Amino acid sequence: MFVPNVVSFDANYLTSIDDSSSLTMEEMIRRCQKTMYRHIKYSLNTDKLRRIMLSNRLLTIYPNITYLNIENNILYPINKKNILNMEKNFFWNIKKMKALSLTNFNIKMKDFKQLTETLEHIDLSSNNLLEIDDGIFNTTRELKVVKLNNNKILNLDRSQITNLRNITYFDLSQNRINIISKRTFIDFSNLRYLNISFNNLYEIQHEGFLKMNHLETLDLSNNENLTLQGHIFKGLSELKYLNISQCNLNKLPSDLFQDTVNLQHLNISRNILTSIENKTFGNLRFMNTLDLSFNKLQFLPNDIFINTTSIREIYINNNKFMKLSLQLFSSATFLKIINAGSNAIEQIGESNVRIRGNEFILRNNRIKAFSELLYINVMMSILDLSNNYIQEVVLNRTIIADDANMSISLVDNRIKNMDIKGISRGHNWSIYLDTENNYIQCNCKSFDVSVVDDKSSSKSSFIISATDTICINQEEICDIFNILNCPIQCNCSYVSSDMSIIVDCSSRNLTKYPVLSDIQIDNLRYTFNKTVVLLNDNHLDLDMQENLGSYHNVSVLDLSNNKITDLKWTPPDVIELNLMDNDLKTLNEKVIVGLGLNKNLRKIHLGNNNWICDENAKHLQSFLIEFNNIKVNKSEVVCNKTGEYLIYTNIFPQQNNVTKMVLLVTATVFLALLSALMMVYYWYGDAIKIYLYSKNICLWCIAEEELDKEKEFDIFISYSHKDESFVQNELLKELESGDIPFKICIHYRNWLPGEFISKQIIDSVLNSRRTLVILSNNFMESVWGKMEFRTAHTQAISEGRARVIVVLYGDLNEDTLDEEMKNYLKTNTYVKWGDPWFWNKLKYALPHSKSRPYSKANEIKS
């Protein structure tokens, strides 16, 4: 336990915490005064509890309280009642309080008069507040963060918030505010963040944000009756993030964004826009992301993005576009993503414009033609054309750009014909085609797409994936070549999908095995790597079985439904062998040994034969035991007399008792040893793993690289900027340049300027295998640090894996720990700086890799 011998209180029996109760707030604090701990944790029965009383005496006795947080942890109480009561002038004696949080009660604004002037942070969310009393903030001139979200506030007037001149963060989301007047925020010149989402806003008066010249984030989303007038955002020259999604907007004034010249992220999704004027985004030269998804747009002017040269992400998916021109994106130098999926696009308009970027999504449209523009003018890494109506794909090597490197998805289309033509002039391009779930005609052209010209010196290539692609009209043989030396009794054909030759001799009434002699394709452009021989449904037995010696290179051999009583030989590298429906009594030892040694064998079918289960079947029984459900199915070999499975039959009954005794003794000894090992591992498991890791022994048991191979970083370091010297001089030096180098994500080096901190926190956590939290007194003062910990901890819980590593740095003041961090440290191990085994323990907790073993040099480091 992280906090041993902490003072605790059983409060389950209480119906109130006040002067009449056996346990008061003052008593709790008094009993904690002589300990080093300043946090009290108690459980309450909210069904019985009638009230919690905060008396003036509490703050008179303890005037140095700087942080007060009382929270109802029941998110949605059935009968929400106000059990929290404060005496009049409760806050009068608090002279040093900086943060106040009272959430999820039914408190009243009148209780908060005479708040201390030192207050910097107040959170009154989820309290069913109906209004903000005038003058409530008269004495709180140092307030920087105000959270009033999830209440029922209807009116917002200047008189209610007039003294919040230093505020930088204001959250009014999830209320019932319906109008913002031109004077509401006239005093908010220092505000950086404003959230009025999920209200009933229908009007924002002209110049309603005029004086907010430092505002960077504005969220007006989910106000379903909102109407935006021109110049409504006048004065917001520093605005970087604007969200006006889900407001039922049907029109955007052309001068709406005239003053927001530094806007970087604009979300207008989930409205009912049908058109946008070409000058609407004319002043947004620094816009990085634009989301217009889930509207009713049918058309955008070709020059609408002519000035937005910095744009990287455009989302126009789930609209009603029928035609899309590449001219629309001509001004962008590089596009990370264009999402035009889930529209009704039938064609890509002709254009000489070339666009470059990472991903172009056109899935779920009605595109019928695979235009050359899509791989000539679209220089994207990923082109998604899945789930369209494309019927034919023609690719011309001659016109492909020299540096093209594309992955094109044609999954779930209607492709019947494919053709690749022309001679490549480039030497360094690569195109990957995914044609999964199509119905391609088996003709010469569709065969030709996977053929490589051996005479070409070009390094360029097409790679075609045809998983689950169905070949229709397969019975029609494509006469593009002759197969040489095909047995006269058989028909031979070529299957391009797996580059195999099929020798079909089935149902020919054969009594002798045909000879296979050097089967070849009379066309050097085509190669094959598999031979399939079908001899099923004949009368074959032992006659001329020596001819099987010519089947040395056969991969699949079907001998089912014949009259075979014994088999003398099988191809050494056969992949699949079918011996069902014959008259086999057993298999000789030589054949069984060969099948067991054959590493290529995937399946052998032995069902419906007359197997005799005597001592001659011992080798077959051993084969079944060793390879059951690997190469063979045990249920296929049934004894002809008893109907029992051979694998379970006692072939040597006289050895039964001896065998049982040997097995019993062996099992007893094994279980005893196993139990002893399990007990040792149970008590010393972590120490054993740390020792093995430090000695480079059995790394396979602790390596986890396959689980997180898609993540970019090994470690994301979360710390307070005040501890930056420790991180740079101690941690980074060892972790990045030590014997086990790790790839580190750190704020000042890997975060992009201008991106939202909350978004970058989430990205950093999700892209890192571990989050390393430097827990110090400085860290607990950091709002963003706590958010980073909470994000990483939540991700770890959702995955059911240990993702968070806590390093205790310095002497920790327990008063600064919140309940979430305290609970985490009680139930999880951590590493303390200064521990002689610090580096061994830390590196063991970090991501393990088989290719990055532990160096013994670390054993001498402290």
Image: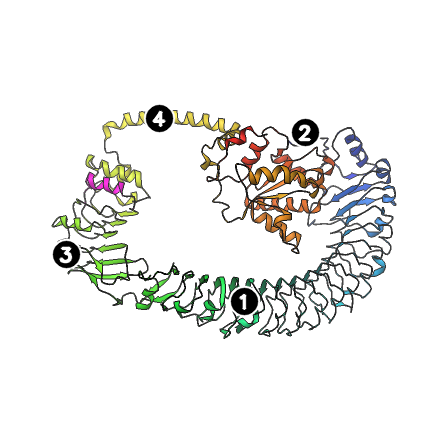
- The residue at 37%/27% (across/down) is 667
Q: Name the residue under label 1.
A: 340
Q: Few, some or many C-alpha atoms within 10 Å of disc 2 (few <14, some 14-19, many ≥20)? A: few
Give the foreground label among 1 and 3. 1
| Residue 368 percent coordinates (x, y) | 44, 72
Q: Which of marks 4 and 3 is nearer the N terminus?
A: 3
Q: Earlier in the sequence, mark 1 or mark 3?
A: 1
Q: Which amino acid does label 3 sit on?
A: Leu
Give the foreground label among 1 and 2. 1
Where the C terminus falls, by quadrant? top right
Q: Few, some or many C-alpha atoms within 10 Å of disc 1 (few <14, some 14-19, many ≥20)? A: many
Residue 4: mark: 2
Q: Name the residue under label 3.
A: 510
Examine the image and state in which quarter residue 395 appears: bottom left
Q: What residue type is labelled 1?
A: Ala
Is residue 396 visible from the viewing direction of this image?
no
Q: Earlier in the sequence, mark 1 or mark 4?
A: 1
What segment is highlighted magenta in the picture? Answer: 583-600
In the image, taking residue 511 as reference, residue 823 lies left or right, namely: right
Task: Tell whether label 3 touches label 4 (CB within 8 Å).
Answer: no
Secondary structure at numbered mark 4: helix
* Structural distance between the alpha carbons of marks 2 and 4: 47 Å
Q: Is residue 148 above or below residue 43?
A: below
Q: Looking at this view, is 714 or 734 the one in front?
A: 734
* Structural distance between the alpha carbons of marks 1 and 2: 58 Å
| Residue 153 percent coordinates (x, y) | 77, 58
Q: Name the residue under label 4.
A: 666
Secondary structure at numbered mark 2: loop
